[in-house]
Amino acid sequence: MDRTFNLQQWHVGGGLGVNTEWVSALTQYCAVGRPLRDDHGRVPLPACHLPDGLQGSDEPLAAAHIWLRRARAEWASVAAFLELAEQLRVAGAPHALVRSALQAAQEEVRHTVLSANVVRACTGQWPSLAPIRVHRKPEANRQRARVRLAVESWLDGCINEGVAALTAQRELAATSVPAAVFALSEIAPEEATHEALAWHILKWACQTGGDDVRHALWDSARSLVTPASESCPHGLEAWGCAGTPTQAGAITHVIEASQTRLTLALA
């Protein structure tokens, strides 16, 4: 069963808000993964549209390209956390973990709007994002679900979201454009909580999944491929876009720290 959701636009006045009725509809439907995955791997990012397009080569437009891709990624993460919540339910996880995944989905809605608002600050245009389809995978049994949860939480949460949180923290320190400051001040701490959620899931999966989970995590850690840093030119730090060296440094730091922490967890 699939279900499609549309991102609604909110006017930015006294602050960004989330349509609570729509978010309530989201939380009533949980479908696995971060980033959004289907049975064939990662799902491509949703399409987007700007009425007048992105033209030119000055700093605001260069930053708009980056923030537009971030908005698409955040939007895909909404469905990713809904799938995570469903897999946690299937695996018999504590209700607190399921609730945290649903809360993260709501936060990703807000991150999408925050990122879109930076695009608006750069271009004067609100981007439109295509409806996102939640793909429901066939339910695995509890043990297979725990193995999948552990491996995907390690890769998509402990590593990828750890990198996202650290990069956002470093970007915030160098940002001066108000819309980007506002976005990163909200996104950075919440991405850190999403990373923490991944570690909580991994710990629970190890405790309940036994050797199957541990062996799968060891295999994943040994075959870990360093994620590529986002291609980002220098000179956009004020717009909340870290240069490639900053991103590469965050990736190296998070991978080293995460591998050490995983080794201790599996000892």
Image: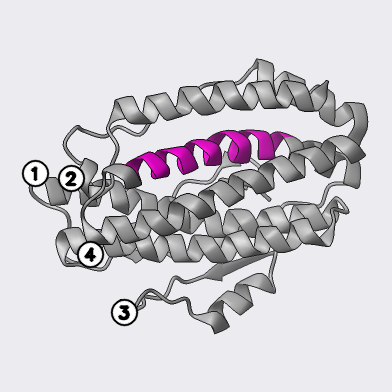
Of the numbered discs 3 and 2, the one sitting upstream in the chain is: 3
Q: Residue at the far bottom: name it.
A: 21
Q: Where is residue 116, by image quadrant?
A: bottom left
Tell me, for residue 62, which label it has, or none.
2
Say which residue label 3 marks.
Answer: 11
Is residue 128 visible to the viewer in this orientation of the structure? Answer: yes
Task: Determine whether, in the image, residue 202 is placed left or right of residue 236.
Answer: right
Which residue is at a point 62% across and 78% down the rendered structure image?
A: 24
What's the magenta bit mostly, secondary-structure-wise? helix
Lateral position of residue 82 relative to residue 161, left or right: right
User: How much space separates mark 2 and mark 4, taking CA atoms?
Assistant: 13 Å
Chain part drawn in magenta? 151-171
> In the displayed image of the protein, which residue is found farthest to the top?
222
Name the residue beneath numbered marker 4. Answer: 120
Q: Residue at (16%, 67%) from the top-left corner?
A: 124
Point out residue 242 in the picture as x, y percentages from the top left corner. 29, 37
